[in-house]
Image (cartoon, rainbow, N blue to C red):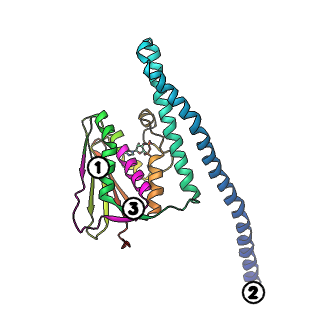
Amino acid sequence: ILMLSTVVLLSIAIWLAYFFAGKAMVPIKKSYARQVEFTTNASHELRTPLSVIHSSVELLEECKDTLPEFEQHILDSLQDEVKRMIRLVESLLTLARSDSKSLPIKMEKVDLVQVSHQMYQAIQPLALVKGIILKLDAPVIEHELTYIHGNLDQIKQLVYILLDNAIKYTPPGGQVMISYRTSQDGKPTLQIADTGIGIPREELARIFERFYRVDKARSRELGGAGLGLSIAADILSSHGAYIHVTSEEGKGSIFEIEFQSEPISV
Ligand code: ADP
């Protein structure tokens, strides 16, 4: 009888726990949705006044030469900061969008070799300004499967984030390389390698966290908000792709993305 009543009591306790946990899930879900909605709205609302400030500063830049030296410096830092805020707001918006999952992403046939070429072109000016040698190794090989099933905008954004970081964290004179290859087990892979400052081993596990930066002061100086890689992680997970990071301090980093090689209906 004692055993039986223990079992009955335990079952009731488990059932009650499930019941209340289920009830508690609803408000948590609701407040999460509200938080996502708030972030989306706030980023949207901030974009317009920021764009106005940005274009006004651009206008002032045109007559910069007529200003005294001190004012010229103020104008320059105003320009840098407003650009940084725009980047931050854009990143927040992207995060809120990927959080909401309400917008179904359009999956299509994406040619990774073509994306590599396009992103190489897009990032070239940034590399030039910083004096970094940018290399591309993604030959167009006939009959080779270089396609994946994905969202073109997101894949471009993913590659851009990694290239932008590679340039940001590589001193002038260094090298950044984007390459495409098929892995031994037939998986399409993209590799973004740099000869930059590298990432300490103990920090590697955390770099994909939101707002995480290895060296806060230095990253802020370089314009980072610690959001790029967390956006990259969201894109990777929505594509069932994996990333592998190898890095050595003072030598450089390699970010290797391995995509799914499922057959794609052409
Ligand atoms: P951020 O906007 O600060 O660059 P990310 O989320 O893109 O944010 O990256 C997180 C942190 O990881 C960066 O602040 C930087 O410290 C480190 N990191 C990312 N990519 C590289 C790289 N290629 N070389 C060295 N450090 C990097």
Q: Are marks 2 and 3 in contact (CB under 8 Å)?
A: no
Residue holding disc 1: 193
Relative to 224, residue 96 above or below: below
Q: Quadrant of ligand 1?
A: top left
For the N terminus, which image quadrant? Answer: bottom right
Nearest to N terminus: mark 1 or mark 2:
2
Mark 2: which secondary structure? Answer: helix
Label 3, label 1: how far apart the Cα atoms are: 16 Å
Residue depth check, mark 1 versus mark 2: number of the one nearer the observer? 1
Rounded to the nearest angstrom, the CA distance separating label 1 from label 2 is: 64 Å
Instruction: Inspect the magenta stretch and tell me whether residue 147 lies in it.
Output: yes
Q: Decide: few, some or many residues near mark 3? Use Cα within 10 Å; few <14, some 14-19, many ≥20.
A: some
Is 236 in front, or is 56?
56
Nearer to us in this view, 26 or 246: 26
Question: Is 252 on the left or on the right of 77, as rendered?
Answer: left
Quarter location, residue 185: bottom left
At 45% from the left and 64% from the top, the residue drawn is 107
Nearest to N terminus: mark 2 or mark 3: 2
Q: Which residues are magenta?
A: 135-164
Could you tell me how far apart the alpha carbons at marks 2 and 3 are, in whole angstroms? 50 Å
x and y percentages locating residue 224 in the rendered image? 45, 39
The circle drawn on residue 242 is 3
Instruction: Point out the tag, 3 or 1, that comes first from the N-terminus.
Output: 1
Residue situated in front as seen by the camera: 24 or 265 = 265
Q: Residue at x 59, y 43 (%)?
A: 44
Residue 26 shown left or right of residue 185 in the figure:
right
Marks counted in the figure total 3
Residue 4 is labelled as: 2
Dots 3, 1 in contact, CB < 8 A: no
Q: Amino acid at mark 2?
A: Leu
